[in-house]
Amino acid sequence: MSTPHPTSHTPRPTPSPDLEEIEIQLLLEGVYRLYGFDFRNYAPSSLKRRVRNLMEAEALSSISALQDRVLHDTSCMERFLLGVTVHVTAMFRDPGFFVRFRNQVVPLLSTYPFIRIWHAGCSTGQEVYSLAILLLEEGLYHRCRIYATDMNERVLQKAKSGIYPLELMQEYTQLYLKAGGKRSFSEYYTAAYDNAAFRASLRENIIFSQHNLATDHSFNEFHVILCRNVLIYFDPVLQKRVHQLFYDSLCPLGILGLGRQETLRLTPYEPHYEELGDRIYRRLH
């Protein structure tokens, strides 16, 4: 009877939590030092899950092996960026937010001769086009300049294209109507094969640009800042940095719009804002 090779059928031991934590920290530190993308203050639990998924997708046996590939292969770094950032979005997501924006924010904006809006972490752009449509219907779009930013150049290219799967238009139409849409949603896009291409005129006042909330600074003063469903992926340290960035970038009485699971409550910035509802806040002074 032969003796089994000591390693041939032995399952690979699962790394201890401490070792995995060390590997992830080294990976993030390397990515920051080499590429300048800073994920060191992202929420650990969700980041760890996405790093594990990447490791499996790359067919690697350890996070250290993923680090080696990311640091030596720029194409793997691109996949890493797509994998560790979340790009789940939709047009008129959370319709109540847009109803509130239309009813309470639009009257404030209508008093301004020119309106600067920053949509931070815009991902593939669906909510940017949603806002452009809303402002167009309220007669304000021609007075607006929307700065749509994201850290990932690849998703920005998708946002710039304004082309989305045609199969999503039925869902988007329902959300548009719930959000108080005033026209036929199909007026805003042209269907071609399996895609829907949104009207180029909706992009006339939008500037798509790279900006990293973890490392970059303010670049203008804005009347409105929207950053929805992004802060939930940051730890408290990075959330505080971003809230300071937004406060410094908003003009007095400026509007901050967050995601449904995000809030200013119990943060150092809560006293500086008035909540209008549906996660829309107005800077007090």
Image (cartoon, rainbow, N blue to C red):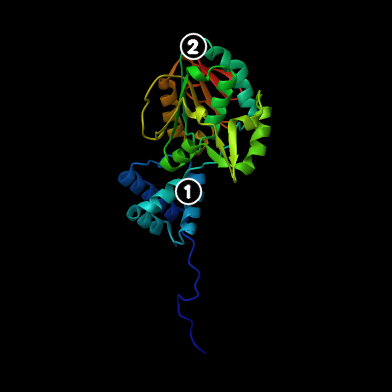
Q: Tag 1, which secondary structure? A: helix
Q: Residue at x 62, y 30 (%)?
A: 187
Q: Position of residue 7 (x, y in %)?
A: 45, 75
Mark 2 → mark 1, Cα distance in angstroms: 40 Å
Q: Position of residue 243 (x, y in %)?
A: 45, 26
Q: Looking at this view, name the residue that lies furthest to the left.
A: 34
Q: Tag 2, which secondary structure? A: loop
Q: Position of residue 3 (x, y in %)?
A: 48, 85
The residue pinned by badge 2 equals: 112
Dot 1: within a 10 Å radius of its alpha carbon, few (fewer than 14), some, or many (20 or more) residues?
A: some
Residue 43 appears in the rendering: yes
Amino acid under disc 1: Gly
Tell how many labels. Answer: 2
The residue pinned by badge 1 equals: 83
Seen from the viewer's position, the closer of residues 16 and 282 is 282
Q: Residue at x 46, y 32 (%)?
A: 239
